[in-house]
Amino acid sequence: MTLVNPADLSAAMLAVVTGIAQRRGGTAELTVDDLVLERPRNRDHGDWASNIAMKLAKPLGANPRELAEEVAAGVRELAGVASVDVAGPGFINISLDAAASGALAKTIVEQGDAYGHGDLYAGVTINLEFVSANPTGPIHIGGVRWAAVGDSLARIFQAQGGLVTREYYFNDHGAQIDRFARSLLASYLGEPAPEDGYGGAYISDIAARVINLYPGDLSRIPREEQQEVFRANGVELMFGDIKAALHEFGVKFDVYFHENELHESGAVERAIERLRAMGAIYEADGATWFRSTDYDDDKDRVVIKSDGEAGYISGDLAYYLNKRERGFERNLIMLGADHHGYVRRLMAMTKAFGDVPYVNLEILIGQLVNLVRDGEPVRMSKRAGTVVTLEDLVEAVGVDAGRYALVRSSIDSQVDIDLDLWGKKTNDNPVFYVQYAHARTNSVARNAAASGVDRSAFDASLLNHETESILLGILAEFPRVLRQAAELREPHRVARYSEELAGAYHRWYDNCRVTPLGDEDVTDLHRTRLWLNDAVGQVLRNSLGLLGVSAPERM
RNA sequence: GCGCCCGUAGCUCAGCGGAUAGAGCAAUUGACUACGGAUCAAUAGGCCGGGGGUUCAAAUCCCUCCGGGCGCACCA
């Protein structure tokens, strides 16, 4: 077997280590995950390094260095391994010969779009609920973060075989809709915005469009009916705007779920009855309560208020059951940091329904996003109408830079998005650095074709320049990066990876020519390098694709 | 008071127990009669917020303190 990727090496090495462990009386079952085979930061430490000897030293009662030497001797015999050294307290450093590591370039080109994919979630039904902004205004920047991250996560799960549904929960039931309607009406009548309502240019805009749509004379019907006209049409228009903005941002939801449906179909009542049947419901102070503290919540929750209206959590109860009935094994909900207090109650609900918290239901909390322009934070207030919207972001920096900027950082960190920076079409802007690298792979391929270089030959052992071994090492890590991004729900890892790959590619480009110079002959070296060039282009394309960012052929 | 997240280079941020802590930008200096200079090379810049602990090994895990953000409704 030729060791063209870390999976092959891991499998072969596992056999070596298992044999040694058993001979020394070890009983534990080892897996490839125990090997922790990784690419060392320092190139002097080889192509791959493992700390397995230090890990096993204690349980086997062995000296870590001796153990490492024994493993090294076995690994040294594997095909494609050039050298194995033991260093420091017991690291095993492995170098592959050029032919073994170089073979990957061809593999990648042949696998194409599928390179890097895995089977972590093969056949698993996954529901991703994100954005879910109320239809009372444009999507503000917090929702936009999830539009970028959630959609990217969906793509990453799909690359692991997951059966993903992107879902938008359309919160069209509560009192906020009334406030929205009254705000539109006030705008129409020239009155100031209601105390608890919404202001801003978009309100008068929506109001004007409602008036245009209305077939008759709006001024001749009673105020209550006017408000209803504004409510029904205003919500519909707002929702249309939201969908259009998301579409322009490259995010397509499979399901737009209306909360109202849950209330009108009796699903909410059924959910409450189910809890009541298990004794988790009680009456107090004229209201109906879910005893969520029995399931690790910090306080009980009202499911039916004393005025007879459903409490906020009621919709969530019914909605969760609905998702489960639709067959989703895993349900992820992405919320802003201002909603982190919901996690415990929703987990309590999950547990009460007999499911496993943090498995069947997961809540991802994203910290807030601040926009910065000219060094000053762009302050927003929904009330005052100074809302920073999805459209604003796209207008300022474009879809690619907007998505990339939002998906590039961990959702656990608050981020400042500098509109001046991300709006630049220069290398200050990380997305251009990566996109340029991709465009360059295409440019090189075009020049190669013009010079008569094609992929008719491939000799992996020729890929022996230092920048090539680095580049191949990074390419080899792509499947692992994708798996990790999926497991940890962290798309930003893919973005960082693409930057690392782009950098290594530029350095290779600087050192190794694909097309012959002047009147040089075309050799197998040129042809083989073209494979590598195209492999890099493929992986950059795959990375950017998972982020929802375009991979231009020319810039 | 309780809870969640954060604190790493001048700035924006990576680094789910491993070796000398990284990238981009900003700064300084170099490389275009060689596949796109939207690039590359080099230099400089850090008690990883402080203090304890666990470990062969801690930016990473645990405890504690300090600092910042966000929450703790019969609102949605």
Image (cartoon, rainbow, N blue to C red):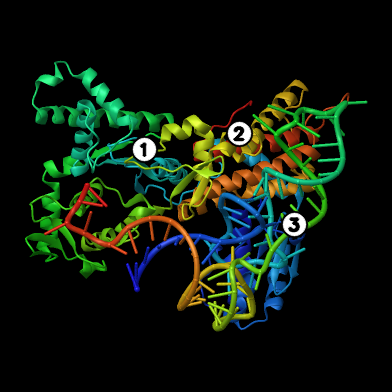
Front-lying residue, A526 or A306 = A306
Horizontal and vertical percent for residue A361?
A: 32, 55
The amino acid marked with disc number 1 is Ile
Q: Which residue is mark 3?
A: A43
Residue at the image point whose x is 26% and y is 61% from the top:
A345
Residue at the image point whose x is 66% and y is 37% from the top:
A427
Q: Chain of mark 2?
A: A
In the rendered image, the quadrant that contains the C terminus of chain A is top right
Q: Is residue B4 left or right of residue A61?
A: left
Q: Is residue A143 left or right of residue A69?
A: left
Q: Which residue is mark 1?
A: A139
Q: Is residue A37 left or right of residue A298?
A: right
Q: Chain of mark 3?
A: A
- Identify the mark at residue A424; answer none if there is no mark: 2
Separation of disc 1 and disc 2 at Cα? 24 Å
Q: In the figure, B6 relative to A103: above or below?
A: below
